């Protein structure tokens, strides 16, 4: 049976079709989920895509977090369902308190779009099993509010528990504390990532194909589960 | 204030009306009275004044613009031509592509962020209204001197506005231009281009037909945004010291626009719409009169049903409001319920505001009272036409006589001198890397961007199965056009055509944004007449019809007009985007060929500007047949795998092209100056019809044979090699030094 | 030490997309009866010395030329009482 990976569309989601394409290229069946629909349509995992849901008004992710679909996703995530939040999706996960910390305005005060080098720090999450710890990859990054911040004790705990999933290399593009590009929950099923692996899945349109691993990882995890 | 109804207008024929304040001329007001056979009501006066403004009626330019129709080349590709929201071109496999470039110059000077943002919003709605999904945007920009304090105010705001709106809308920004010249100091040019894709059967037009069909207004609520903006802004230059005529600025809401796009595409998908028009300049006045004028029958609108953000607005103001993110659709009665349901799904407010009638009038009611009763054509399509006087400026001869000869402008004679000038040009704001600007735009979203800045053209895949794609390039050189408007406009087309071909796509069609000074100045009007004539003649030769565009006049400060700046966008198609040709030299050992002929042509050049701050002489000559041949060779070589890199030669000449291709690909080059060629001219001339290509050694014979057979001069000038640019016998410069010169320039000035 | 507060709001006639998005979300979250929402910015300026008319005039100038974009925004300047 094909693995079904849901991709949520909130009003203002932008990279939802791109996440669906990446799911398809990884060999799974993408399922479009609608923010108003509580039903997850028997998906095995969920991607919260990038974009500007509700225009990033109030705070990024703050309004989407209260959509009906999120009630179910929060419930299922706590039961172990793999959830990947990319960019705006990461912001939604933080606003939902599935992940600690918050994403704030880039220190440059500018939106930045660049090909970003990352180091995968934790290759044991549901979304990073196909990488090796310490592996360096290049994927696009594009955000205006991507600066990860948290209290010192939260940061220390994330480090101590190995919950930093990816770190910026060479350049810290947005002033994130401790160069953090992505984190996971304690169980390793919920991952938030500011860069966009779904835009590095084809040689024609991406700088590399090194982002595909996030999507193949979850497939293997689900098949082996 | 009492309501000025049609009945009231009939009873009070002599009531004084503010036609002059609304920008109408005396004879125009008289003509309105003649058309209506009475004085207009306040609402009618508002409609006529805004629709007959220069911006909406093209009254000064249309006698010249009609050449684009008269000299239109035969093209099987044209599906919808000039006159609709945007032209539509057949690109094969059942796909149609629509694209258009438009100006938002004056609003962007007043409020850079919102002006530029709403410029994107407007052009995207134009494309959407044709039935297409918008897939990419581009922004050709012109600013004052890079080191001028006001450029620091205007540029960051404009760039942030383009990014803020476009990024939030989810459209990749794949190209455009950034040019600095003090002539744009008080008049920055903010042009915006959008490309959209649809299937042939999804093409929609702005027309209202079928009595009983409903008129639905949907999108944002109507507020007091930019009331009179179009008329006032486009009719007068603004002047900081003069009377405040600045209208309320329009604020864009990209989130609302994103919802409008998705909602509209879903509505198109279910075939619920008979006709559609976006609301831009002149708002409801324009949308209702154009829909009614282009269709059959009349239209009846209940203006008090329009959802308002500000309940104090009068009917005149509602008609003139330029609130953004609104559309107007004509829907059959049995499809209205489903239409409204889809709008509700997307949280988009939608209201039936009227219906198509079997009469011939556009009738608008306010709480049951008739306030507008006009023949719609007289508002929308039969505005005034001016034959503005024009004459060749008396300074033109002197300007052209001031040629940048070796005697007048000192040229470098040593290798070190050539190197110094190469670095000066590469590090000048116009030629330096624009990545600080373009990195503020999302180029990845939608996942189909194949080429984007700093490539020669932006290229988008439109079918993931077949790899069909389209590409667009925009170009315009105000310096060339100032020296010779006829040739300058042709050079803009030639360069955009060449850029599209260099990427491997076949040029199909043109959209243009004509930015000029005041049409009331005969010098400016001559520039406009010459530029349009040149562009129309060139489009005929190259077989690329003008599908639409925009004219922006009154770009001047006091008596001083900007350089005439026709910006030309060329759209091309490529059957297989995996065959596209990038500009970067990526493979060691590949052979570098210079295609075309190089003459001593430095009038208007980047070198003359950067090194000598000089503008004079004649621009490079144009040979359109040569351009077409060069394009054919570039496309064939790309398709058949004979070249791995190609870069057009334009501003800065061969030297600048080498700098860009080496830095992009991360490899150096060894270059040999051809026998008998002056090294300075070789490196800095801006002769048109040229490109540099990188040929794999295995393809050299085949490539040479093709060029020889087709009669295109192809000169082997070197090889991709190492990490220095080595012009043998002259100078060497390391890639590190080139990078140092070429990057960081814009941020140092503006960040 | 005194504190001067500058509140910057979009002019009433200017569209406030953020406020509208918040207003539309409120009823969905069960907060009924809110007719309109407008979102603005608040600046708190801590002064080195006491407030007098000259200082306030300078702050108004700063607000007019820098803190607010008076093309689209209004501002108010007020002194926050000591000890609050």
Image (spheres, rainbow, N blue to C red):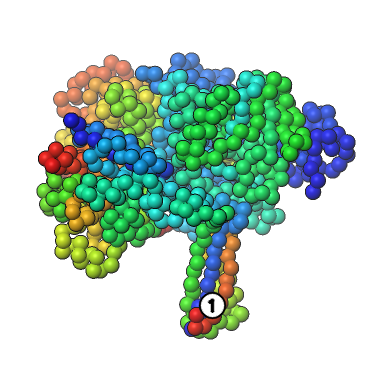
Residue in the foreground of this view, choosing between A107 and A165: A165
Q: How many labels does the image show?
A: 1
Report the residue marked by disc 1.
Answer: C80
- B655 horizontally vs B153: left or right: left
- B406 horizontally vs B186: left or right: left
Asked if one can make out residue B657 in the rendered structure from this viewpoint, the answer is no
What residue lies at 50% left-to-right and 46% top-to-bottom?
A: B253
| Residue B370 coordinates in the image, percent (x, y) | 77, 34
Chain identifier of the residue bearing label 1 in the image? C
Asked if one can make out residue B315 in the rendered structure from this viewpoint, the answer is yes
| Residue B291 coordinates in the image, percent (x, y) | 62, 27
Q: In terms of secondary structure, where does tag 1 sit?
A: strand
| Residue B735 coordinates in the image, percent (x, y) | 23, 48
What residue lies at 72% left-to-right and 30% top-to-bottom?
A: B363
Decide: is B634 above or below A15: above
Please tell me in which quadrant of the rendered image residue B36 appears.
top right
What residue lies at 18% left-to-right and 42% top-to-bottom?
A: A218
Please tell me in which quadrant of the rendered image residue B700 appears.
top left
Dot 1: few (<14), some (14–19), or many (≥20) neighbours within 10 Å?
Answer: few
Residue in the foreground of this view, choosing between A131 and B607: A131
| Residue B278 coordinates in the image, percent (x, y) | 56, 34
Decide: is B508 above or below A69: above
What residue lies at 34% left-to-right and 21% top-to-bottom?
A: B632
Residue in the foreground of this view, choosing between B266 and C48: B266
- A154 horizontally vs B91: left or right: left
Residue in the foreground of this view, choosing between A7 and A141: A7
């Amino acid at each position: 049976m094909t693995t079904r990976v849901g991709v949520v569309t909130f009003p203002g989601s932008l990279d939802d079709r791109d996440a669906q394409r990446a799911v398809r290229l990884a060999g799974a069946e993408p399922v479009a989920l609608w923010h108003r629909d509580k039903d997850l349509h028997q998906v095995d995992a969920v991607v919260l895509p990038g974009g500007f849901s509700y225009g990033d008004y109030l705070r990024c992710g703050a309004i989407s977090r209260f959509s009906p679909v999120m009630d179910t996703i929060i419930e299922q995530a706590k039961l172990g369902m793999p959830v990947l939040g990319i960019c705006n999706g990461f912001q939604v996960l933080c606003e939902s308190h599935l992940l600690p910390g918050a994403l704030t305005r880039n220190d440059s005060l500018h939106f930045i779009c660049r090909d970003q080098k990352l180091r995968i720090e934790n290759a044991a999450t549901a979304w990073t099993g196909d990488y090796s710890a310490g592996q360096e990859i290049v994927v696009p990054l594009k955000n205006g509010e991507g600066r990860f911040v948290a209290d010192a004790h939260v940061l220390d705990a994330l480090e101590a528990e190995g919950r930093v999933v990816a770190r910026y290399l060479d350049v810290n593009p947005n002033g994130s504390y401790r160069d953090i590009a992505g984190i996971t929950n304690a169980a390793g099923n919920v991952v938030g990532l500011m860069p966009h692996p779904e835009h590095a899945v084809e040689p024609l349109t991406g700088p590399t194909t090194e982002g595909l691993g996030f999507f193949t990882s979850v497939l293997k995890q689900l098949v082996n589960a | 204030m009492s309501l000025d109804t049609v009945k009231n207008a009939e009873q009070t024929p002599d009531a004084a009306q503010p036609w002059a304040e609304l920008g109408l001329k005396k004879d125009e007001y008289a003509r309105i009275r003649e058309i209506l056979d009475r004085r207009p009501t306040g609402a009618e006066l508002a409609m006529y004044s805004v629709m007959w403004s220069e911006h909406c009626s093209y009254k000064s330019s249309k006698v010249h613009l009609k050449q684009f129709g008269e000299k239109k080349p035969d093209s099987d590709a044209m599906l919808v031509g000039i006159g609709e929201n945007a032209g539509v071109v057949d690109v094969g496999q059942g796909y149609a592509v629509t694209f258009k470039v438009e100006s938002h110059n004056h609003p962007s000077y007043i409020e850079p962020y919102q002006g530029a943002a709403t410029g994107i919003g407007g052009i995207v709605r134009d494309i959407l209204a044709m039935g297409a999904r918008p897939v990419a945007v581009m922004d050709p920009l012109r600013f004052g001197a890079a080191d001028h304090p006001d450029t620091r105010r205007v540029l960051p705001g404009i760039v942030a506005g383009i990014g803020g709106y476009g990024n939030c809308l989810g459209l990749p920004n794949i190209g455009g231009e950034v040019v600095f010249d003090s002539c744009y100091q008080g008049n920055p040019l903010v042009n915006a281009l959008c490309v959209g894709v649809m299937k042939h059967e999804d093409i929609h037009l702005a027309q209202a037909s079928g009595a009983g069909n409903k008129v639905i207004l949907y999108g944002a609520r109507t507020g007091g945004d930019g009331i009179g903006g179009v008329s006032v802004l486009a009719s007068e230059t603004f002047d900081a010291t003069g009377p405040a005529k600045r209208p309320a600025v329009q604020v864009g809401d990209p989130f609302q626009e994103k919802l409008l796009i998705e909602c509209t595409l879903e509505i198109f998908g279910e075939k619920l719409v008979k006709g559609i028009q976006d609301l831009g300049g002149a708002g409801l006045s324009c949308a209702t009169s154009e829909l009614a004028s282009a269709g059959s029958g009349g239209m009846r609108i209940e203006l008090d049903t329009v959802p308002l953000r500000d309940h104090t607005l009068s009917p005149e103001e509602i008609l003139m409001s330029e609130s953004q993110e609104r559309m107007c659709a004509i829907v059959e009665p049995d499809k209205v319920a489903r239409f409204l349901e889809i709008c509700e799904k997307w949280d988009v407010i939608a209201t039936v505001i009227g219906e198509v009638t079997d009469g011939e009038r556009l009738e608008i009611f306010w709480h049951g009272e008739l306030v507008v009763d006009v023949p719609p054509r007289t508002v929308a399509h039969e505005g005034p036409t001016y034959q503005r006087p024009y004459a060749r400026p008396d300074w033109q001869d002197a300007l052209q006589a001031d040629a940048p000869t070796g005697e007048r402008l000192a040229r470098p004679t040593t290798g070190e001198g050539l190197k110094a000038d190469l670095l000066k040009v590469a590090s000048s704001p116009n030629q330096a890397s624009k990545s600080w600007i373009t990195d503020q735009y999302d180029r990845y979203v939608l996942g189909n961007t194949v080429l984007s800045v700093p490539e020669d053209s932006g290229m988008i895949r439109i079918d993931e199965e077949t790899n069909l794609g389209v590409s667009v390039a925009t170009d315009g050189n105000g310096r060339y056009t100032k020296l010779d408007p006829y040739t300058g406009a042709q050079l803009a087309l030639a360069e955009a055509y060449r850029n599209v071909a260099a990427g491997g796509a076949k040029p199909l069609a043109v959209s243009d944004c004509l930015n000029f000074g005041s049409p009331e100045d005969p010098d400016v009007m001559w520039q406009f007449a010459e530029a349009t004539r040149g562009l129309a003649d060139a489009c005929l030769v190259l077989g690329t019809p003008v599908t639409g565009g925009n004219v922006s006049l009154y770009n001047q400060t006091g008596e001083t007009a900007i350089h005439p700046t026709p910006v030309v966008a060329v759209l091309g198609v490529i059957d297989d985007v995996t065959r596209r040709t990038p500009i970067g030299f990526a493979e060691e050992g590949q052979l570098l060929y210079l295609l075309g002929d190089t003459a001593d042509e430095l009038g208007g050049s980047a070198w003359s500007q950067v090194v000598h701050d000089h503008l004079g002489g004649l621009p490079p000559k144009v040979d359109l047949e040569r351009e077409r041949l060069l394009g054919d060779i570039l496309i064939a070589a790309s398709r058949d795998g004979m070249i791995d890199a190609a870069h057009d030669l334009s501003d800065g000449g061969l030297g600048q092209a080498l700098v860009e291709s080496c830095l992009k690909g991360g490899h150096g080059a060894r270059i040999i100056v051809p026998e008998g060629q002056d090294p300075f001219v070789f490196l800095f001339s801006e002769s048109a019809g040229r490109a540099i290509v990188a040929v794999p050694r295995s393809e050299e014979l085949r490539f040479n044979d093709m060029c020889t057979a087709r009669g295109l001069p192809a000169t082997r000038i070197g090889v991709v090699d190492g990490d220095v640019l080595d012009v043998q016998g002259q100078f060497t410069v390391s890639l590190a030094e080139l990078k140092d010169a070429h990057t960081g320039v814009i941020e140092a000035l503006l960040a | 030490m005194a504190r001067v507060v500058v509140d910057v709001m979009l002019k009433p006639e200017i569209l406030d997309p953020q406020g509208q998005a918040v207003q539309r979300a409120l009823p969905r979250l069960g907060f009924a009866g809110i007719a309109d929402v407008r979102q603005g910015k608040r600046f708190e300026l801590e002064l080195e010395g006491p407030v007098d008319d000259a200082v306030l005039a300078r702050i108004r100038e700063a607000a007019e030329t820098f803190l607010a974009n008076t093309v689209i925004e209004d501002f108010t300047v007020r002194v926050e009482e000591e000890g609050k």
